[in-house]
Image (cartoon, grey):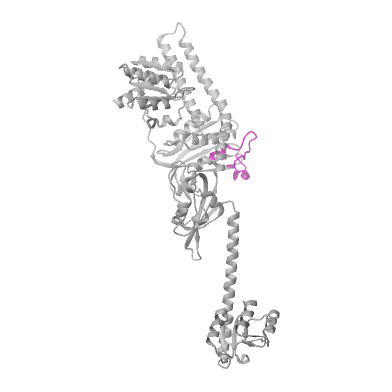
Amino acid sequence: MLGGAGDISFEIEYADTLARGIEVLGENGIDLVLLDLQLPDSEGLGSFAEMHERYPVIPIIVLTGMSDEDLAVKAVQLGAQDYLIKGEVDVNQLKRSIKYALERQRDINNRKSIEKALFEEKERLSVTLSSIGDGVIATDTEGNVVLINRIAERLTGWSHADAMGRFIEDVFFIVNVESGEKETSPVSKAINANNIVGLESGTVLITKGREGCRYVSASSSPIRDRDGIIIGVVLVFRDITELKKLEEELLKVQKLESIGVLAGGVAHDFNNLLTSIMGNISLSSLPDISDEKVKQRLFQALKACHKAKDLSTQLLTFSKGGALENRTVMSLEKVIRETANFTMSGSNIDFKFVVANNLWSVEIDEGQISQVISNMLINAAQAMTNEGKITIKIENAEAKKEKGIPLEDGKYVKTTITDEGIGIPKEYLSRIFDPYFTTKQAGTGLGLSTSYSIIKKHGGYITVESELHVGTKFVVYLPAKGSPVSVEVKSDPSIKQGRGRILIMDDKIEVREAAGEMLSHIGYEVEFAKDGSEALKHYKRAKMEGEPFDMVIMDLTVPGGMGGKEAIEKLLLYDPGVKAIVSSGYSSDPILEKYKKYGFKGVLPKPYEMGKLSDVLYGVLAENN
């Protein structure tokens, strides 16, 4: 019958017993078995079961003379490809049965091969995800977790069982460390942007149960099918808490390097100013000098004091810490001009400004940006041998017009610092912002890496171009914030007469005496206290005696005693209507910036002169009356 099977060609092996049949299967590459259920050494379904158990991948067609439908069903249930009855099957039926049996088995084998390959690939993926040091979470297009590796379990505090099927923002709960506000998951951003999306600097991951937090960096990438349709997102993230701590330490170390470079210039300027002050005061004390000349000399001494105050303010600004503690919307031009004048003091290097009109404002930590500009100016100055010029150009820029710069869409203020120094070799340019990389024998290699970190924290970007023996150009982009900066309108500096009772609290007797003399001169009655505790006693006594103080001026910092911050809290509890002004030599202290938050009515940074003192008092009393 098989010989007449037409277009199908067979090589046939015969066996007259089950035992012999099993031997043949083991010796030759048999593709299909026609099995008679009535054999000398075996009969019924037992024959099929034994052969199928030994060779499960070889298709078996049961061929028998017994016409038993129940037996046929059981054979198929056990795995037989077909059940044919001798004498009732023709050649076409046999051909069709063999063809379909072979095709089905090929499909089964192919499916098993694919399943095996998928299983092996899944195992490789599982081992890889368990071995890498990054956290990995995969989600569907709705943002529901479908995979989480062990590192991600540890970093988030969520177990695999608990995380599966949960919304990604429940498992990967992130907040902005500056604002304290919850951030949108980069998974959602990746789906909306249809592209790879990262996290903003200063993002912390809050662990399950709000038991802890850690700084993280992360990126999310869409997963696509063969047609390019997004079918999910994979989120990869890592713990950078220790790196953040290292960055802060680098900032501190770098400051020491910069301050060392600046110290000579600062000392030079202070000595010049002190010479002017001491010389003019000495001249004003001569016995034969006229009153008009005394006024002129004292006016010159006062001008020098103002310059010393500006220099001191710059030094305090530069000494602020590494974190972005006090972002303020301000003029970048003002910060850069002050920093340049401060940094280049005592230097023979010429520098000039090229500033565009209507510059947009920026929201920055003034101390941090001052440090960046200072770092770049120091590098520029050190690259020149007291010859050449440094040009500082400040202008507005839009991201879409800045080719090759990886900026997010929006407006920026662009600062370009160009020197005419020795330049940087091309092979060093790619490493110029790496920590500890330096070409200077005395350098630590931290200045530019710190600058890069600061600009990135502000959402900006910094680039460098250089040519040997021609010079170097640094370009800094900072995000614009709002409309062009308005010119600050200064208050009338004339001395305003007043009257009332003023309590001055300061631990320095020379400050108390000078402030007291100035206040008495413009019409106020003055009492003194050397710390917060004494100020409280005087204030309560005066109120009980019916002669309350109209104003209290309090020093913020009193070594070994109660300072202004604690004193105002206690005064407000005693008298919610107290009018107090905070004063301090630490002009960058956050309390001076947000004085109303602490209960003060005004602020008086040290040092100050009589005009400024009268102006602040007049303003506070007028506003509150």
Visible residue check, residue 339: yes
- In the rendered image, the quadrant that contains the C terminus is top left
Secondary structure, magenta segment, majority class: loop
Residue 448 part of the magenta segment: yes
Name, please, the residue furthest toward the bottom.
Answer: 87
- In the rendered image, the quadrant that contains the N terminus is bottom right
- Looking at the image, residue 579 lies above or below residue 187: above
Q: Position of residue 121 (x, y in %)?
A: 59, 63
How many marks can you see?
Answer: 0
Name, please, the residue furthest toward the left.
Answer: 625
Q: Position of residue 620 (x, y in %)?
A: 33, 25
Q: Position of residue 381 (x, y in %)?
A: 57, 33
Q: Nearer the viewer, residue 349 or 188?
A: 188
Q: Is residue 305 left or right of residue 102?
A: left
- Looking at the image, residue 145 lies above or below residue 578: below
Residue 524: quadrant of the picture: top left
The magenta stretch is: 423-451
Q: Is residue 323 left or right of residue 550?
A: right
Q: Nearer the viewer, residue 543 or 180?
A: 543
- Seen at 57% across and 26% down, the residue is 264
Residue 108: quadrant of the picture: bottom right
Q: Position of residue 510 (x, y in %)?
A: 45, 16
Residue 608: quadrant of the picture: top left
Residue 545 part of the magenta segment: no
Visible residue check, residue 474: no
- Looking at the image, residue 391 lies above or below residue 44: above
Q: Is residue 415 left or right of residue 546?
A: right
